[in-house]
Image (cartoon, rainbow, N blue to C red):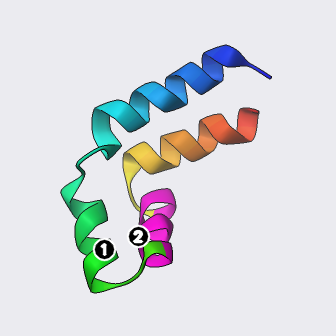
Amino acid sequence: MDTKVLEKINKLEQTYCKGCLLKEVNRTEGSKSAAHSFCITECSVGIDMKMYGNKL
C-alpha cells in the first residue's frame, strides 16, 4: 500500500473535513449517506480524496 497517498488523504481530511460546516448541515438535514455523497461528488476536497483513493 502506498503510504504517501494515505498521508495525503489524511492531511486533506484533517485540514479541511474536520469541522466542515457543509458536511454537518448535510448530515442534520439529510442523512449520513447524503453527506458522504455530497462530499465525494460535489466537494473539491472530497473529489481529490477520491482520486487519491483510486490510486490505492
Residue at disc 1, secondary structure: helix
Q: Is residue 33 above or below residue 13?
A: below
Which portion, as a residue range, is magenta? Answer: 33-41
Observer-nearest of 50 and 1: 1
Prevailing SS of the magenta stretch: helix
User: Which disc number belongs to residue 26?
Assistant: 1
Residue contact at pointers 2 and 1, CB within 8 angstroms: yes
Q: Position of residue 51 (x, y in %)?
A: 62, 41
Going by the numbered disc 2, the residue's amino acid type is Ala
Q: Position of residue 4 (x, y in %)?
A: 63, 15
Q: Residue at x 50, y 49 (%)?
A: 47
Q: Residue at x 24, y 52 (%)?
A: 20
**First along the sequence among labels 2 and 1:** 1
- Give the side of residue 27 with respect to residue 48, left or right: left
Residue at disc 2, secondary structure: helix
Q: Position of residue 23 (x, y in %)?
A: 31, 62
Q: Residues within 10 Å of mark 2 (few under 14, many from 20)?
A: some
Q: Is residue 51 above or below residue 25?
A: above
